[in-house]
C-alpha cells in the first residue's frame, strides 16, 4: 500500500473549498494522516495595498491580513470539522499557486486536495488558474474536487459522512506517465476494498470490420497492466470504448457511479498543455466525481 502521511488542503473559504476540505478530512481520518489547512493571502487583491505601501505601513498591513486570514481559517475549520482530526492551520502571504507548491515541497506533502470552479465554464479552468497551475506543477498527486451538487439535501448529508471509495475508475493511454497513477489506483482499491475499472478509449478504429478484434486486444493489454498478485486479490474490471476520450470517461463515470477517477498526466511542457487541457480539464469540468491527477 502507498502511504499517505500528510495531506495539504488549500482553503479560500468558497463553497468549492468546503467540499474539498471535507474530502481531505475523510482521507486524513482513513489513512490516519496529518492534515494541514492552508490559506493564502494575496496582497495584490486588496485595493488598499498601494496606499499602505505609500504610507509606510506595508509590513503592518500584510501582517494584519495574515492574522485576519488565519483567524478566518480557524473559524472555517471549526465549522467544518466533525471528527477527531485536528488540522494544522497555516496562513501565508504570496501568490496562491506558488505558495501552495512551495509549501507542499517543504513539508513533503503526499497529497494535495483542492476544489475547483470548473463547471461554471471551460474558461474558468484555463492557464493561470490556481488549481490548474498546481495540477501541472505539483510533484505529488492532486485530488481535484468538483463543484458541489445542487442537491442541498445531499450536501447536508455529505457534511457528516466519510467519503468511502467503492468504485474507482483508472483511465490510461498506455503511456509511461500513467504507470504511477495506476499504482495509486491499485493502492486505493486495496485500501478501501473497492472495485477498480481500467478504461482505455480508442479515438478511432481505421477498419470498423475489425472492431471486435481491436477491442479484445486492447482489453488484454489492460489486463496485463495489473500485477498478477493484484489480479488475484482485487476486484478488477476492464472497459474499452471508442470516441473522444473525455466524453467517454465522463459518460462511464456517470453510468458506473464512480467515487474517484484517476488519471496520469504530464502537464509540464507547452505541448503537454494541449493534451492535458483537452482531456483532464474537461473530465474535471464535466465529471460527477473527484479526479486524482498523478504525474510521472
Image (spheres, helix red, strand yellow):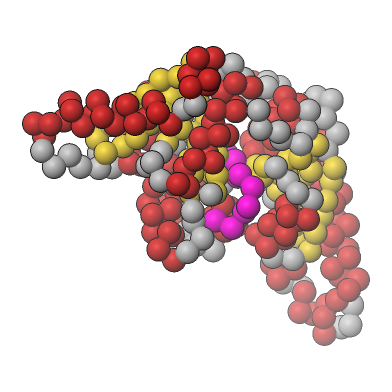
Total number of numbered discs in the rendering:
0
Q: Nearer the viewer, residue 180 or 13?
A: 180
In the image, 261: left or right of 23? left
Q: For the view shown, which residue lies furthest in the front direction?
A: 228
Q: Is residue 77 left or right of residue 242?
A: right
Q: Is residue 85 shown to the viewer in this render?
A: yes
Identify the residue at image location x=76%, y=60%: 41
Q: Is residue 223 above or below residue 276?
A: above
Name the residue: 70% across, 48% down. Answer: 10
Q: Position of residue 276 (x, y in %)?
A: 43, 53
Q: Residue at x 17, y 26 (%)?
A: 212
Magenta span includes 295: no
Residue range (magenta): 136-146
Q: Position of residue 40 (x, y in %)?
A: 74, 57
Measured from the top left, where is residue 73 in percent x and y? Answer: 81, 46
Residue 137 shown in magenta: yes
Q: Is residue 1 left or right of residue 129?
A: right
Q: Is residue 11 something that shows in the picture?
A: no
Residue 274, given in percent of the width and then of the height, sits at 39, 59
Q: Taking 82 as reference, is 140 above or below it?
A: below
- Quadrant into which the N terminus falls: top right
Q: Report whether 109 appears left or right of 153.
A: right
Residue 198: quarter of image: top left
Q: Residue furthest left?
A: 209
Residue in front for this viewpoint, 251 or 201: 201
Tell which of 231 and 189 is nearer to you: 231
Q: Dividing the picture into quarters, in which one does residue 93 lie?
A: bottom right
Amino acid at each position: 500500500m502507498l502511504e499517505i502521511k500528510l495531506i495539504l488542503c488549500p482553503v479560500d473559504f468558497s463553497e468549492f473549498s468546503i467540499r474539498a476540505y471535507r474530502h481531505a478530512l475523510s482521507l486524513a481520518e482513513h489513512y490516519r494522516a496529518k492534515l494541514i489547512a492552508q490559506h493564502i493571502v494575496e496582497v495584490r487583491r486588496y485595493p488598499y495595498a498601494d496606499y499602505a505601501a505609500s504610507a509606510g505601513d506595508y509590513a503592518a498591513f500584510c501582517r494584519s491580513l495574515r492574522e485576519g486570514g488565519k483567524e478566518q481559517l480557524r473559524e472555517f475549520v471549526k465549522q467544518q470539522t466533525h471528527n477527531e482530526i485536528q488540522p494544522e492551520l497555516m496562513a501565508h502571504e504570496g501568490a496562491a499557486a506558488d505558495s501552495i507548491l512551495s509549501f507542499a515541497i517543504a513539508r513533503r506533502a503526499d497529497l494535495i486536495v483542492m476544489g475547483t470552479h470548473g463547471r461554471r465554464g471551460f474558461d474558468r479552468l484555463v492557464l493561470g488558474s490556481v488549481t490548474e497551475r498546481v495540477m501541472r506543477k505539483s510533484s505529488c498527486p492532486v485530488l481535484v474536487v468538483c463543484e458541489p451538487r445542487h442537491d442541498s439535501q445531499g450536501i447536508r448529508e455529505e457534511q457528516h459522512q466519510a467519503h468511502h471509495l467503492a468504485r474507482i475508475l483508472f483511465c490510461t493511454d498506455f503511456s509511461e506517465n500513467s504507470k504511477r497513477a495506476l499504482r495509486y489506483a491499485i493502492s486505493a482499491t486495496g485500501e478501501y476494498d473497492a472495485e477498480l475499472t481500467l478504461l482505455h478509449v480508442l479515438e478511432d478504429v481505421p477498419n470498423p470490420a475489425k472492431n471486435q478484434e481491436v477491442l479484445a486486444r486492447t482489453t488484454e493489454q489492460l489486463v496485463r497492466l495489473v500485477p498478477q498478485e493484484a489480479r488475484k486479490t482485487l476486484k478488477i474490471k476492464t472497459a474499452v470504448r471508442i470516441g473522444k476520450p473525455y466524453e467517454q470517461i465522463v459518460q462511464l463515470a456517470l453510468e458506473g457511479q464512480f467515487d474517484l477517477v484517476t488519471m496520469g498526466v504530464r502537464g509540464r511542457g507547452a505541448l503537454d498543455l494541449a493534451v492535458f487541457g483537452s482531456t483532464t480539464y474537461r473530465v474535471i469540468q464535466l465529471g460527477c466525481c473527484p479526479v486524482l491527477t498523478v504525474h510521472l
